[in-house]
Structures are given as C-alpha cells and as structure tokens.
Image: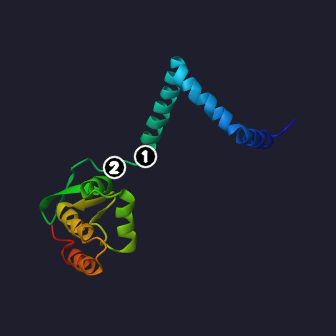
Amino acid sequence: MKSREERNEQARRWYCKNREKVRARHRERIESEPEYRDRKREIQRRAYAKRMASRPPTAPKNASREINGVNVQTFTVRETARLLDIGESTLNCWMMRGNIPEPLFTEPILFTRTQLYLMRKLKMAGLNRKARKKAKKAIFKDWNWH
C-alpha cells in the first residue's frame, strides 16, 4: 500500500500532465452548467470569507488619532495609495528605501493628511532628480507636523 506522500506525489504528476484538459473541462462546465457554476462560486465565497476572517484587524476608515492633544485624520496604506494614485507596493517601497520617514503610527501603519500632502509632492517630482531631492528634503523636515 502506498503512503499518503506517494499518493499525493502521483496525483501532482498526473495533474501536471493533464492540467490543460482539466482546466478546459472546468471552464466548459462553468459556462454550460449553472448548478456547477453556482456551487463553485459558493465555495469561493466561503474561502474568501474564511481568509478575510483570519486577517489581522485594520484601522477603521477615516480614523482619527490624537497627536499632542489634537485629533488628526489618518489614512491606511491602502487609502493613502488610492488617494495618491499609486500602488500599495510603491508606497511600501518608498518606506523600505527611506524615501519617506517612519510613519507616526505603525500598528497598523497610518498616515496623516499632512504626510499625504508631502508624499504627493514626492510623487509629483517624478523622475527629475533635483525636484525629487527637494521634495524628499521637505518631507523629512515637515513629516511630524500635523
């Protein structure tokens, strides 16, 4: 009798050989069989709900935090990226490369409206090295001002 690992490896090899046929059959069934399509969609909905339930909580949208006794509107990385019209990965790269200072709030990462404005300056500087250097200098100077 084969062990579980051997059976899994055999199934993986079979699927690799027959992947295109299996996927073509799946697409065909999705298009032609409403019950099959509904069943698959329900499975996907449950899997998505399970993934979302296991994610760490994020800050509420348009949350405000207190800085030196003043309530300041804050934005998550996703909201900030959307407002700047850039990708979240671009914003994360800016943080990793040191193009922008460490955010005031790090669990979860939140940016203030002033920081958003300063990051917009960096984005507008684009590839012009001189303008980018000037924008970066302004960012580091005014970052913690709210």
Q: Residue at x 20, y 77 (%)?
A: 138
The amino acid beneath tag 2 is: Thr
Give the alpha-carbon distance from disc 2 to disc 1, as whole Å: 9 Å
Q: Residue 64's spot in the image, x, y percent?
A: 19, 54
Position of 12 with respect to 135 (left or right) is right
Disc tally is: 2
SS type, badge 2: loop
Position of 111 with respect to 22 (left or right) is left
* Disc 2 to disc 1: CB gap under 8 Å: yes
Q: Residue at x 39, y 73 (%)?
A: 97
Q: Quadrant of the N terminus?
A: top right
Disc number placed over residue 55 in the picture, else none: 1
The amino acid beneath tag 1 is: Arg
SS type, badge 1: loop
Disc number placed over residue 40 in the picture, else none: none
Q: Residues within 10 Å of mark 2 (few under 14, many from 20)?
A: few
Q: Residues within 10 Å of mark 1 (few under 14, many from 20)?
A: few
Compared to residue 1, the image places residue 135 above or below, namely below
The residue labelled by disc 2 is 58
Instruction: Say which quarter of the image contains residue 146.
Output: bottom left
How did the renderer colour the structure? rainbow
Q: Residue 50's spot in the image, x, y percent?
A: 47, 37
Instruction: Say which quarter of the image contains residue 49.
Output: top left
Q: Residue 108's spot in the image, x, y percent?
A: 33, 57
Q: Residue 66's spot in the image, x, y percent?
A: 17, 60
State the residue in front, 96 or 64.
96
